[in-house]
Image (cartoon, grey):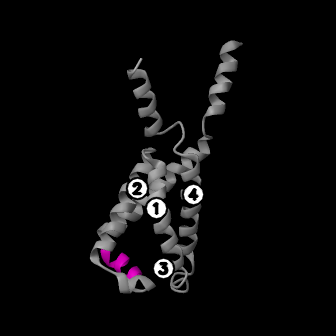
Amino acid sequence: MATLISFKHVNTLRQPAWLTILRVLLGGMLFIKGIIFISDTTKLEALIQGSRLAEHYTPLLATAISWANLLCGLFILCGLLTRLCCLIQIPMMLVAIFVVNIPNRTINNGSELALSIFILVLLTIFLLEGSGRLSADEYFRTYYKEGNK
C-alpha cells in the first residue's frame, strides 16, 4: 500500500503526457520551420520584403531568424533550456503575427496567421510551465543531484 501511495505522489509531480507531446510537437514545428527557412532563404526574404520590416532588412536578420528557429526548435523538442528558448521565440512570433502575417493574411488565407498564433500560445504555456519531467533539463538536474551524493 505504501508503494501505491508513493507512486501516486510521483505521478502528481509530473506534467501530463499530452503537455509533453505538445512540447515535442512545438519543438518539431519550429525545427522544421528553421530547416525550411535555411534551405530556401528566398521564402523568408519574400516574407520580410512584403512586410513593414523591409526597411530594416539585412541578410543577417534572415539568417538570425532561421538559426533561432532551428536551434530553439531542437532545444524545445529535447526539453533543454525550454524557458529560455521560449523567451527568445516569443518576440519573434509577435513580430511574425503583427508585422508579417496580419498585413499579408489575404495572400495565404490566414493559415500562416493561425499557425503563428497557435505557436505563440504554446510558447507562452511552456515559458510558464517549463519543460516538465520528460526532458533533458530534468535528466541533467537529476543526474547532477545523483552525482553530488
Q: Earlier in the sequence, mark 2 or mark 1?
A: 2
Tell me which amino acid carries mark 1: Gln
Percent of width and height locating residue 109: 56, 81
Residue assigned mark 4: 124
**C-alpha separation, residue under disc 1 versus residue under disc 4:** 10 Å
The structure residue drawn at horizontal position 60% and vertical position 41%, both measured from the top left corner, is: 17
Q: Earlier in the sequence, mark 1 or mark 4?
A: 1
The structure residue drawn at horizontal position 51% and vertical position 44%, both measured from the top left corner, is: 131
Does residue 16 appear left or right of residue 35 in this picture?
right
**C-alpha separation, residue under disc 2 versus residue under disc 1:** 7 Å
Residue assigned mark 2: 72
Residue assigned mark 1: 89
State whether residue 62 is above or below residue 80. Answer: below
Secondary structure at badge 3 equals: helix
Tell me which amino acid carries mark 2: Cys
Percent of width and height locating residue 4: 68, 18
Q: Earlier in the sequence, mark 3 or mark 4?
A: 3
Secondary structure at badge 4 equals: helix
Q: Is residue 51 visible?
A: no
State whether residue 53 is above or below residue 120. Answer: below
Q: Cβ–Cβ below 8 Å for labels 2 and 1? A: yes
Tell me which amino acid carries mark 4: Thr
Tell me which amino acid carries mark 3: Val
Tell me the crowding category of disc 3: few under 14, some 14 to 19, or many 20 or more residues within 10 angstroms, Cα based: many
Is 44 included in the stretch rendered in magenta?
Answer: yes
Residue assigned mark 3: 100
Q: Nearer the viewer, residue 140 or 42?
A: 140
Q: Which residues are magenta?
A: 41-48
